[in-house]
Image: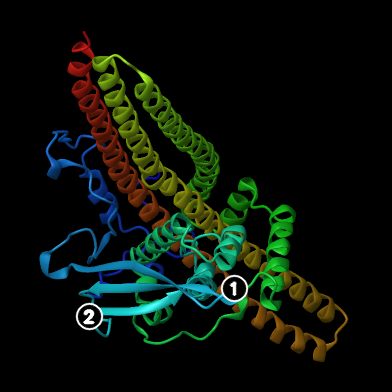
Amino acid sequence: MANNETPLLFGDGKKEPESDDIFKSSSEVPINDDSGDKNEDNDPQDLFGQEINLSNNEEDQIPSIQPTTTPITNGPREEESDVYNIEINVTEPEKRGDGMTSYIVYKVVTRTTIPQFRRPESSVCRRFSDFLGLHEKLAEKHQSKGIIVPPPPEKDVVGTTKLKISKDDTHGEFIEKRRACLERYLNRLAKNKVLILDDNFRDFLEREGDLPKSSSTSALSGAGLARLFTKVGDSIGKITFKMDETDQIAYCNSLVFKQSKASFEWFEEKQQQIETLDAQLRRLHSAIEGLVAHRKELALCSKTVSSSVTLLSSIEEHGGLSRALTHLADVEEKMHNVHLDQADADFFSLAELIKDYIGLVGAVKEAMNQRVKTFKSVKDAESALTKRREAKAKAEIARKNDKVQQEEMAIQDCEEKLDKAKKDFEDISATIRKEIARFEKQRVKDFKSTVINYLQSLMSSQQEVVKHWEQFLPEAKAIA
């Protein structure tokens, strides 16, 4: 939808020389560099053209979910010597403490070839609040610049409370889901070239011992309440100030910017696409959750049938029929396990991916909102400059020389603020365009990989079902 030639909102659009820094900040890269787009055009158009091997061999079965290995490359031309990898695993959840003061600690293992990290392999222990504190630091530092900061897993007050007061190990599913979410969260952060080299992120992965406790992660803390009021204020700001497209184009045309209309239209189109994507992802997530619930209910029904058939076989006097019923009960028991495994595949392969992207879409919308705030700063600076110029004109008419000098100094200050606001708007617009391009490319890769793996798991489970029933068929035919 966006042209390969990305217009600059401010400046002359001159192409700057490429840098040798493989970790060049996205805000420093000119958005009219179309090398990334050309690289995307070389990708195959068929997103699902990969050949799928659905043989019955054990080694061909879908493996368990593994953490991603994130390559850090120097631009679209990937040379072997310029590729650095990082792999992050969250493992070994351990409950510490008793009662309401207890908490879960996770072992975070990082393996990387990135030279900016202190060690090629490190292992630290982190609790859930540490992950939330990391997000707060990254969001505060980078979100205002237009960087898409992936959100952390949501708090589950009910599940956490049950885990705290429980004295047994019946909440293993809750802990495993959270562990998988935290692992995906860290690996998504590692896919961003800006966030991966942030000091806070590297300290989180490498600093031994406990991190400084963050007071802002609690919903009832002072920082939490302040965060709530900030969100309310932002929501009101979104309602009271909207970037009307006609307003934007007229504004930029008045400043004689090249291709500003196409640029603002691009952002307007992207905004609508993101809103539509958000609605569709939420609808799909709800449908998949229903599918998971249906498979679990089907598994329970298979278990019930197995128990009933077992009781029936125990009172059956006919030997052949009794053996067939016993075998049928065994098959239904196996169907119970197959349905449960498929429900887990539905959840971990599809539902969790969709949920992650609902959060990522929210992060994209937040980045777009930061651009709106920056545009408002430009308008406010321009309005303040206009008022100062009017005040200077009135002072000149009234022949108030002292007042004229004061207004001239104020005008100079306002002009500097306006220039800075324009540059900030130019930078954040360029960064957001680059971030959205990266987001869309990664989204296609993630969905392609997930759909292929999900199809493989579906076919594998269906082959298992057929195998179990084929084994039962001779037993049923042998009833005399």
Name the quadrant containing residue 371. Answer: bottom right
> Do we see residue 92 in this rendering?
yes
Give SS at disc 2. loop
Q: Position of residue 367 (x, y in %)?
A: 53, 60
Q: Position of residue 35 (x, y in %)?
A: 25, 55
- The 10 Å Cα crowd at callout 2, few under 14, some 14 to 19, many 20 or more, is few
Amino acid on which the number 1 mark rests in the picture: Gly
Q: Position of residue 384 (x, y in %)?
A: 73, 72
Give SS at disc 1. helix
Hey, which residue is sitting farthest bottom in the picture? 402
Q: Which residue is mark 1?
A: 99
Q: Position of residue 91 (x, y in %)?
A: 34, 67
Hey, which residue is sitting farthest front in the picture? 317
Front residue (pair 146, 15): 146
Relative placement, left or right, of 245 versus 454 is right
Q: Residue 475: which disc?
A: none
Cα–Cα gap, marks 1 and 2: 43 Å
Amino acid on which the number 2 mark rests in the picture: Pro
Relative placement, left or right, of 211 versus 124 is right
Front residue (pair 341, 207): 341
Relative placement, left or right, of 203 versus 474 is right
Tally the numbered discs. 2
Considering the image in quadrants, where does the N terminus appear? top left
Q: Disc 1 or disc 2, which is closer to the eye?
A: 1
Q: Which residue is mark 2?
A: 115
Residue at (21, 8) in percent of width and height: 480
> Do we see residue 4 in this rendering?
no
Callout 1 touching callout 2 (CB < 8 Å) = no
Residue at (24, 22) in percent of width and height: 469
Residue at (41, 58) in percent of width and height: 176
